[in-house]
Image (cartoon, rainbow, N blue to C red):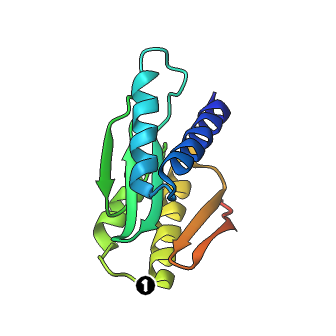
Amino acid sequence: DFQELVDVLKYNITMYELENEKAATPTNVAKLLSIMLYQGRFSGIYYAELVVGGIDNSGPKIFVLDPAGGLMEESFSAVGSGAQIATGILERFFREGMGEDEAVELAERAMREAISRDALSGDGIDLLIITSKGSRMEFIPVRTA
């Protein structure tokens, strides 16, 4: 159950922060999640492909986790049924150092392409924008013909 995974992750992050007297970094969270997925790999209770993102002292971080706990740091990521389509757009147009507006526009473009070609990708875009000033969620409705 995904909610259980979230609850256990939140608990473990809180314990880490109390024991170490510092905030968990995106790298800490990704490694913890990797361990949790690895431990549950045979039971299948946490079968999910996940993305962890955030900003630490060294800059922005994106980690992709497979259902068995495999962990890779990437410059960008797409997961889910439309990932191959979205990844093609991202590989073609992503550049290191993109500004926020340009990156958001690229993410939206990649998702619109995936939605238009993959029925399981849904009919809207939930976009989480993470900057050094904080994070915000945006929903962009997408209507397909």
Q: Name the residue nearer the viewer: 142 or 67.
A: 67
Callout 1: 10 Å neighbours few (<14), some, many (20+)? few
Tell me where residue 134 sits by quadrant: bottom right
Q: Name the residue nearer the viewer: 50 or 90.
A: 50
Q: Residue at x 46, y 31 (%)?
A: 36
Residue extending furthest toward the top: 43
Q: Where's the C terminus, which quadrant?
A: bottom right
Residue at numbered disc 1 = 99
Q: Residue at x 42, y 23 (%)?
A: 39
State whether residue 82 is above or below residue 66. below
Q: What x and y, as percent, mark residue 66? A: 39, 37
State whether residue 119 is above or below residue 134. above
Work out whether residue 79 can be spotted. no
Q: Residue at x 45, y 76 (%)?
A: 103
State whether residue 48 is above or below residue 86. above
Helix, strand or loop at label 1? It is loop
Q: Name the residue nearer the viewer: 36 or 48.
A: 36
Q: What x and y, as percent, mark residue 33? A: 46, 39
Is residue 13 toward the left or the right of residue 39 in the image?
right
Work out whether residue 53 can be spotted. yes
Q: Where's the N terminus, which quadrant?
A: top right
